[in-house]
Structures are given as structure tokens and as C-alpha cells.
Image: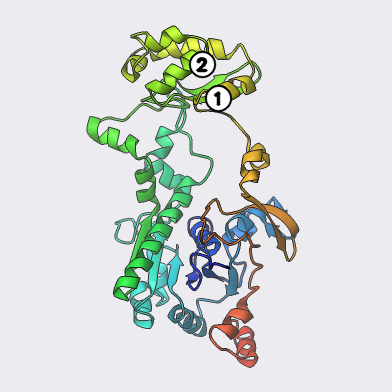
Amino acid sequence: MVLPHPLSGIRVLDFTRVLAGPYITMVLADLGAEVIKIENPDGGDDTRQYRPPERGGESSYFMAVNRGKKSVTVNIATEDGRTLLKELAAASDVLIQNFRPDVMQRYGLDYAAMRVVNPRLIYASISGYGDDSPYRLVAGYDQIAQGEGGLQWLTGHGDAPPVRAAASVADTFTGLHTGMAILAALRARDLTGEGQFIDLALLDSVIAITSFMAQMAIFNGEDPPRPGNGSGLLVPVGLFACADGDMNLLIGNDRQFQRFCRDVIGKPEWATDPRYAKISGRQAHAEELVTAVAAILAEKPRDHWIATCRAAGVPAGSVRSPLEAVRAPEPRARGLLQEVDHPTAGRFETVGSPIKMSGTPPKPAGPAPLLGQHTDEVLGEILGYDTDKIARLRQGGVIG
């Protein structure tokens, strides 16, 4: 029996570019939604120009977050272009945009206007500060959100300046929050028949993902210490130098500490030592305990310690580079790395969906589209435009 993908039959009109929006529309495409990416005929998504690296004339950045979508080029500044987009919105389930909140309003494509066109439309807006913020017209960027949301301050070592998380986590988490809101809104629409407006801010998402650190600050009325590779709560935790490389170790509870002492480092007496037996004691004696553990781990190779820890049920792992991570056996065993065929870049590997579902799995990874690759297909199949009308729109600069 061939099962449909989870979002089969859902059409998403995607006005997003760069990362936060494209990331979640890619996830929706993985789950089976038809995603129509609206791009400016003059260059398209900004990340098409983010190179090197590139392959076949296409940016690796763009291809990383736009797989499985259809690209339609429309000049939003033209009246005919806006009419076309409203027709597409009338035939869609979801619209996502990540312009400043005033941009779509300026072109008459904001939620109030689109709701008239399609009352069932779920309209998601992603911005730096949110639609009702006093800073609603300030452009939002990942690094700025990490800084203003407290994440950058928390990242790094206590004796060094704050450090931005290298991966754009403000963008990706905002995208994922948007996706969860869209799925919830689709469920609500099943019950009410009505669409709704979704408003996501990068700043809100960053504060939310600081999670217990933000709550600690609220409770204590002061900032938690910057933990570096350690933890303000658990000991021993962190990056430890072994005889031939670094290893991450995380002792999450007293049971794990007992197994670590008994079965990994050969110090069973530490498991019952009143200084170390409980989390509170390990916190109070953190410096001496971490120093002693570090001396033992430095005596043998990393692979020995990782294997011994895992055999004992103690969390430990290596520190891989991005290339090592994608070449590692674990993601390959799970099918995370998939091959795609691209019109100009040829056949190459890409990171596919991390989602596993037994009944309605995500689609296999597909290539990111060329700029405007699906314009004629979408206008013909969805809007019923004939070839003459499409040719006139192209000649008039409405489409690319």
C-alpha cells in the first residue's frame, strides 16, 4: 500500500528568502506540501548569490534550504504581478513571508487583503521583532537576534567575550516555531473552516530557546554564569583532552556518575564519597573533581574512553568537524545523506529530512529549483493561463 506524505494536498505560497522562512518551507516540502517559491525575476532569493561554494552555477547555501520547491518569478511591483499572486493565494492553503511587516501591506498583499481573497488562508509572517513590536520596521538578522535575545551572551567562556553560535540558530528555530504554528493552524482550520494570522519574531524565538537559562535569570534576578563547554548545573560536564584528542563528557545524574566511577575510570570510591555522590556535592567541589577527572582521561585515547563510557551507559562523544559529521556512519545508516539530481549541478549528496515517520514518511530529498524554473508550469496548471497570456506577462516584465 502506497501511503501519502503527511502534507500531501497542502499548497504553500512561499514569499520567503535567506534562511528562517526558506528553512521551514523546505521542511513543509519534505513532508509533502507543494511549495511555490515566489522570487524576484532580478536575481531571486538573496542566497542565490551567497557563494562560494557553488556547483553548476548554483549556490550551496541556496541549495541547502530550498530543496523540493517550485520557483516562480513574479515582479511584485507590477499590478498584474500582484493580481497573479492574489490568484495563487486564493488557490493556496498557507502563505509565508519574511519581509518587514510593512512591505506586504504596501503592495496590498498583507493578511487583511489576502483574507478577503481566501478566508481559509493561513498567513504566517516572520520578522525580526514581530508585527506589533515598536521595532516592527527594523530588519531582523540572526546575529542581531542572538545578541539581543541573550544567546550570544551565554555562548563562550566566562573569561572571554560573548560568541555568536556559528549555525544560524535564531533563523532555524524561528522557522521551526513557524512550522509548528502552521500545523496547529491547519488543525484549527479543520475544526473551524477559518484561516488565521501567525506572527513570529526572531527575538522571541531566541529568548524562548534560552529556556532554563532565561528562567534562572528571572528567578535569581541576575545573569547565570557563562558556562563555556561546561554546565552551571551538572558536574562533570565538558570537553576533556584525551591522549589523542578531545571528548565531550556529560554526567547527567547520580546514577551515571556512579557508573562512570565504577565502570569507566576505576574510581568506585568516588561514587560514595560525600563530596561527589550527589549533584549538589559535585557542584560545590566542581574544580577539584573536574581536575581529577581530566588527569585520568588524559592517559588514554579518545576512542577508548568513548567506547568505555557508552558500554557503561555514560554519555560521551567525539568532537567532529562538519565534514566529519556528514561522513560519519550514524547519519548514513539512518539515510540522512541522500543523493539528488540537479539540472545544472548534476548528481550530489545533500542532507535530507531528519524526520522519521513509520506511516507517512517525508519525501526523498529533491533538488532546489533554478530561478523561475516552474513559472510556466504553475501559471498554466494552477491558474489556467494559456501560453499566449504567459508570453504577454513575460514580455511586460511581470514574470521572469
Q: Is residue 89 visible?
A: yes
**Quarter residue 215 falls in:** top left
Residue 108 vertical position relative to residue 292 in the rendered view, above or below: below
Determine crowd level at label 1: few under 14, some 14-19, many 20+ residues with C-alpha closer than 10 A: few
Q: Which quadrant of the rendered structure holds the N terminus?
A: bottom right
**Residue 324 x, y percent position in the rendering:** 66, 37
Read off the residue under disc 1.
311
- Residue found at the very far front of the displayed protein: 1
- Looking at the image, which residue is at 39% across and 15% down? 286
Question: Taking the image as drawn, is residue 127 in sight?
Answer: no
| Earlier-in-chain disc, 2 versus 1 | 2
Residues at marks 2 and 1 touching, judged by CB atoms closer than 8 Å: yes
Front residue of this view, candidates 232 and 41: 232
Judging depth in this view, the residue of 184 and 40 nearest the camera is 184
Residue occupied by mark 2: 263
Amino acid type of the residue that numbered disc 2 sits on in the rendered structure = Asp
Seen at 63% across and 73% down, the residue is: 372
Secondary structure under the numbered disc 1 in the rendered image: helix
Relative image position of residue 153 (x, y in whole percent): 40, 34
- For image coordinates 48% across by 13% down, the residue present is 262
Amino acid carrying mark 1 in the image? Ala
Rendered view: 108 above or below 271: below
Residue sitting at x 75%, y 58%: 347
The answer for how far apart the CA atoms under marks 2 and 1 are is 9 Å
